[in-house]
Amino acid sequence: MAKCKRIGILTSGGDCSGLNAAIRAVVHCACGKGWEVLGIRQATLGLMARPPQFIKLEIDQVDPLLTSGGTMLGTTNKGDPFAFPMPDGTVCDRSEEIIAGYHQLHLDALIGIGGDGSLAILRHLAQQGGINLVGIPKTIDNDIGITEHAIGFDTAVNIATEALDRLHFTAASHSRVMILEVMGRDAGHIAIAAGIAGGADVILIPEIPYTIDQICCQIKQRQDQGKNYCLIIASEAVRTQDGETLTMTNRLGQCRYGGIGQYLADQLSDRIGVETRVTVLGHIQRGGTASPLDRLVAAAFGVAAVNLIEEGKYDYMVTWQNRQVLSVPIAEAIAQYRAVNPEDTLVKTARGLGIYLGD
């Protein structure tokens, strides 16, 4: 009889819809094999704590979570364990504490659900401390190189598309230019997918330069056609026409992308006098019920991750390619940053539809 394994699972980085569906799938598959599953609280912070913070996961406990947003385990996107910020303002390497926490729990393997940054940190910890790691990709930005789908992206696109659907009506009613600013870090996947699906007239992404004059021409062309409104969707990472990165800094000194929507509104109002309104979608894109596709992908990833552990295949990430789940080395998976290629199908589709994309 095969040895009963004890595996850990954690979610790291920003939250998104579909994480609980992945946790649920891992628990179902692992418990079906007679294994024990420990959910690590607050990502690597749970392993850093003493005693390590975890919850034993059972099928009945996770079954209701299929449609719930966020992550039942909690997460964090702060505090690199190799340079962890301390109360006195210094930084400290606390990686050995996390590694010790893993071994104190007598885990046979760890499933880490995260984006490229989280997976890079987890892999560094695994290589340093003998952790048997399997990765599951999640990011609303969909910018991990070797996977067609990452958990959370489809739901974010659905929410952005619904926002555009709603903005259509108020834009037409008031003859306005409506600007929707969406997330996307340094990649424009959400903006271009939602922009096409939601009928945007202008889509701005960080990968393709644009000019305010050309946006004005698009608006005027629509006016000449008797269309009294215009919808613009812009990724938060889009720079100004002069190449300036727009960011916002909070009282803690943390810097985030933000402001491209208002910049565009001010520029358009000054140049052609159109009435503009800006909607910043923000974290709404991360929350709520996961889309059916995100649930499906999360379920497939969770089962595949457990199967990799059963095969003893560690330092791999599960990936969706050509309508199936495969596995690739984590180092290979996170080596390629997946920005929008100007020759991508969606770029050609947008241009074929007459949507202004820039350049």
Image (cartoon, rainbow, N blue to C red):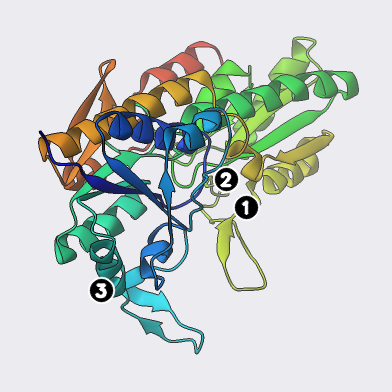
Helix, strand or loop at label 2? It is: loop
Helix, strand or loop at label 3? It is: helix
- Amino acid carrying label 2: it is Glu
The residue to which callout 3 is attached is: 96
Contact check, label 2 and label 1, Cβ < 8 Å: yes
Q: State whether residue 356 appears in this view.
A: no
The residue to which callout 2 is attached is: 236
Q: Which mark is residue 258?
A: 1
For image coordinates 48% across by 54% down, the residue present is 75
Q: List the single residue furthest toward the bottom.
A: 88
Q: Residues within 10 Å of mark 2 (few under 14, many from 20)?
A: many
- Amino acid carrying label 3: it is Glu
70 and 108: which is toward the camera: 108
Rounded to the nearest whole Å, what is the CA distance between mark 2 and mark 1? 6 Å
Across and down, in percent, residue 167 comes to 76, 25
Q: Residues within 10 Å of mark 1 (few under 14, many from 20)?
A: many
Q: Is residue 125 above or below residue 22?
A: below
Across and down, in percent, residue 290 comes to 55, 28
Q: State whether residue 326 appears in this view.
A: yes
306 horizontally vs 255: left or right: left
Across and down, in percent, residue 334 comes to 25, 45
Q: Earlier in the sequence, mark 3 or mark 1?
A: 3
Q: List the single residue furthest toward the front.
A: 1
Rounded to the nearest whole Å, what is the CA distance between mark 3 and mark 1? 36 Å
Q: Is residue 307 above or below residue 282?
A: above
Q: Which mark is residue 192?
A: none
Q: Earlier in the sequence, mark 2 or mark 3?
A: 3
Give the quarter of the figure containing the N terminus.
Answer: top left
Helix, strand or loop at label 1? It is: loop
For image coordinates 46% across by 25% down, the residue present is 295
- Amino acid carrying label 1: it is Gly
